[in-house]
Amino acid sequence: MFLKFNQKIAILSSMPLIFLPVVGIVTLPHFSALAQNGICACASSEAQPQRGQRNRSSGNFSTQGCTTTLSWNAPKGVSFNVMRDVSGGRDPVELSNVARGTRTQNPNQRSLYIANPKGARGGFRVCARNT
């Protein structure tokens, strides 16, 4: 199994963690250790939209294969939207005003991202847990 940490991959096994450089997106299957621990997806976000972006503040993540209801975890006082990346089209807002403890229906989409965060002073991490 592979987990992305700040542009490096950690290979999880019975051996110590090995970090390798990564190019692109790493997707975890729904049967991964994270899903077994109740975590559907996690994403690292910047405090504001990325350079050259109107809304996007994180890379893509997926909620496919997770439960129908999700509970979101983010730093206290931070809220954000979740948008869907549409290639060559307009990205729709899937969830709005999400914050710590917010429960939502699972958008069950592959290419989601954190957008327009409010209340963040620096980069932060968001996780959606299966409920």
Image (spheres, helix red, strand yellow):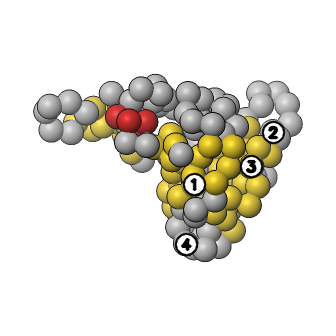
Q: Residue at x 47, y 27 (%)?
A: 30
Rounded to the nearest whole Å, what is the CA distance between mark 1 and mark 4?
Answer: 11 Å
Secondary structure under badge 1? strand
Q: Does the residue at mark 1 contact the one at mark 2 (Cβ under 8 Å)?
A: no
Residue that numbered label 1 is attached to? 72
Q: Nearer the viewer, mark 2 or mark 3?
A: 3
Q: Is residue 45 above or below residue 39?
A: below
Quadrant hosting residue 92: top right
Seen from the viewer's position, the closer of residues 116 and 100 is 100
Q: Which residue is drawn at 63% across and 59% down?
A: 102
Residue that numbered label 3 is attached to? 95
Which of disc 1 and disc 3 is earlier in sequence?
1
Residue 59 location in percent, x, y? Answer: 59, 42
- Amino acid at pointer 1: Trp
Residue 111 in view in this figure? no
Residue that numbered label 4 is attached to? 76
Q: Few, some or many C-alpha atoms within 10 Å of disc 1 (few <14, some 14-19, many ≥20)?
A: many
Q: Few, some or many C-alpha atoms within 10 Å of disc 3 (few <14, some 14-19, many ≥20)?
A: some
Quadrant hosting residue 17: top left
Q: Nearer the viewer, mark 1 or mark 2?
A: 1
Q: Does the residue at mark 3 contact the one at mark 1 (Cβ under 8 Å)?
A: no
Which of disc 2 and disc 1 is earlier in sequence?
1
Secondary structure under badge 3? strand
Q: Which mark is residue 91?
A: 2
Residue 115 location in percent, x, y? Answer: 70, 53
Rounded to the nearest whole Å, what is the CA distance between mark 4 and mark 2?
Answer: 27 Å
Q: Few, some or many C-alpha atoms within 10 Å of disc 2 (few <14, some 14-19, many ≥20)?
A: some
